[in-house]
Amino acid sequence: MKKRVIFLAAVISLMSYNALAQSVSARGSMLARAEAKIAAKAAGQGVGYRIIGAHTNNKVYMTGEWVRKQDNRDDA
């Protein structure tokens, strides 16, 4: 029974990590437009994002990954 509990805890912890370990991509005519598309996708999922890379060839192709949203409260 104890082994099952440990196994289930490990599976659940990996599931929550994998939910954020997803990549996302977008195309746009400018860097700002491609990033805006990624930001909109992240907002729709309720997560933050981090840009991994971008390249251009008449259009911008940008990739990113989901990250946990940071609490941006100012503690002043």
Image (spheres, grey):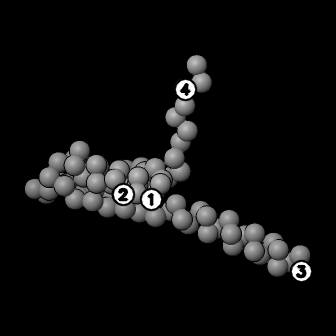
SS of the residue at dot 2?
Answer: helix
Q: Is residue 64 above or below residue 22?
A: above
SS of the residue at dot 1?
Answer: helix
Q: Quick check: marks 2 and 3 in contact, CB under 8 Å?
A: no
Q: Is residue 15 above or below residue 53?
A: below
What amino acid does circle 1 point to?
Gln
Disc 3 designates what residue? Answer: 1
What amino acid does circle 4 point to?
Asp
Q: Quick check: marks 2 and 1 in contact, CB under 8 Å?
A: yes
Q: Quick check: marks 4 and 3 in contact, CB under 8 Å?
A: no
Mark with earlier residue (1, 4): 1
Mark with earlier residue (4, 3): 3
Identify the residue shown where x is 46% and y is 64%. 22
Measure the alpha-carbon separation of dots 3 and 1.
36 Å
The residue carrying pointer 1 sits among few (fewer than 14), some (14 to 19) or many (20 or more) residues within 10 Å by Cα, namely few
Disc 2 designates what residue? Answer: 41
Q: Quadrant of residue 2?
A: bottom right
From where the camera sits, is residue 53 visible? no
Disc 4 designates what residue? Answer: 74
Q: Is residue 11 above or below residue 35?
A: below
What amino acid does circle 2 point to?
Lys
Q: In front: mark 4 or mark 3? A: 4
Q: Which mark is residue 45?
A: 1
Identify the residue shown where x is 24% and y is 52%. 34
